[in-house]
Amino acid sequence: MQDLRIGVVGLGLRANLADAAHHPGAGSVVAAVADTDPAVRAGVADRFPGAVAVDDYRKLLDDDTVDALVVATPDDTHEAVACDILRAGKPVYVEKPLGITVEQCDTILRTAYETGTRLYVGHNMRHMGVVRLMRDIIARGDIGEPKTVWVRHFVSYGGDYYFKDWHADRTRTTGLLLQKAAHDIDVVHWLANGYTSRVNAMGDLMVYGDLPRREPGTPRPDGWLREFDWPPATRKDLNHVVDVEDVSVMNMRLDNGVIAAYQQCHFSPDYFRNYTVIGTEGRLENFGDRPGDEVKVWNTGPTGYRADADAVYKVPESKGSHGGSDERIIGEFCRFVRDGGVTDTSPVAARMSVAAGVMATQSLRDGGAPYDVPPLDPELIAYFESGQRRDAAPAPAPR
Ligand SMILES: NC(=O)c1ccc[n+]([C@@H]2O[C@H](COP(=O)([O-])OP(=O)(O)OC[C@H]3O[C@@H](n4cnc5c(N)ncnc54)[C@H](O)[C@@H]3O)[C@@H](O)[C@H]2O)c1
């Protein structure tokens, strides 16, 4: 099997995804990088020997030596970049979130439908061991039918990763309830087997609104990453615009009746996601979200709290970034480029997670008023759920 030759558009902090795609002789190789930043282009030859570096991704669209493209540019650029690539007929991987508005997502899905070009969306949490373990437990029926899902998301490094660059500007992201939560909303949908139909939310900018900011146009300073200044209010050099919330709480009603809640805080001392799923016959909860951490299940009857639980499962060991999920998601993308078909990630689900995040953001900026999530065109749902084949009869796909 020849290596799939991948072009990467945007080689910033998310460069570990490109690393996961670079395995010469073992299935895929980074053959080209397009990045607008000359300093990034200067480092391409060392990182990916033999790869070309260009300043404009459009230079790769007619390049026959590039089989597929991975888009890892800032969220507000995804629609324009992805649609150009789809129109050029090259299979494309778009990092999450798919877009920053419902309209952007729908335009990408419709362009993929009309061109027939393969579209893949990078929700790598679907390939994380802890998520797959929880999904397996639910699928076995160990907690009965899932009815409610609660997620607490503690983002210790939020002040560094999300308030020192474009993430902090709502014109570039809409808000962190979309930007950061799109992953977890998607996981809630996947675990509960439904899509959010109605939301309300509350949120505020509590800690990072009044801290020292950089002048517009000045780069992120050396050492900005993983400073973990403590307490959080000692952070400085924030983005020149900071108008997204650093605390948010969102309620969801899913189309199958499940009720879910998601809470995010960017000044917590620790980083982790804590999921609880309660079904008609039990409850599960994860204690940590990395390989070796535990998911516990209680399902033998009402008692007081029992730390030993009824069953304890370990998240499988795995190497690589994001708990090994980056290697696995690139593997699935390469398989999809070669063979097509249904995948564990889903463009429809990616759109539905953005739509829930957008409407929740609207709600929290409107005093917590409830909003309905706009439905997706059934023609597009049928196309994507049948594995992106226009001639195929719609078949149900895993969400
Ligand atoms: N799935 C995950 O776990 C995960 C994690 C982090 C980031 N992300 C996503 O990855 C994407 C990139 O995030 P990041 O943190 O690396 O951002 P970043 O700002 O660090 O890097 C973006 C890179 O894109 C380049 N760029 C910007 N516009 C461009 C354009 N039009 N053409 C070519 N290059 C362009 C910039 O020069 C920069 O090098 C975002 O969509 C983000 O949400 C996903």
Image: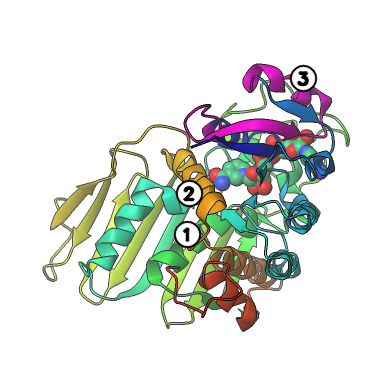
Residue that appears at 45% across and 59% down: 344
Which residue lies under the disc numbered 1?
A: 343
Q: Is tag 3's residue or tag 1's residue first in the polypeptide sequence?
A: 3
Residue type, mark 2 in image: Glu
SS type, badge 2: helix
Assess whether residue 34 is covered by the magenta stretch: yes
Q: Is residue 161 visible?
A: yes
Q: Residue at x 41, y 39 (%)?
A: 323
Few, some or many residues within 10 Å of mark 2 (<14, 14–19, 20+): some
The residue at the point 41 percent across, 47 percent down is 128
Specify the quadrant of the image occupied by residue 102: bottom right
Q: Quadrant of ligand 1?
A: top right
Mark 1 vs 2: CB contact within 8 A: yes
Residue type, mark 3 in image = Ala
Residue hosting label 3: 42
Q: Residue furthest top?
A: 46
Residue name at image x 22 percent, y 66 percent: 140
Foreground residue, 48 or 37? 48
Could you say whether the residue bearing mark 3 is in a helix, strand or loop? helix
The reply to whether the magenta stretch includes residue 44 is yes
Span of residues in magenta? 20-49
Label 1 sits on a secondary structure element that is: loop
| Rendered image quadrant of residue 16 | top right
Dot 3: within a 10 Å radius of its alpha carbon, few (fewer than 14), some, or many (20 or more) residues? few
Residue 370, x across and y down, in percent: 61, 80
Type of amino acid under label 1: Thr
Q: Nearer the viewer, mark 3 or mark 1?
A: 1
Separation (CA) of disc 1 from disc 2: 7 Å
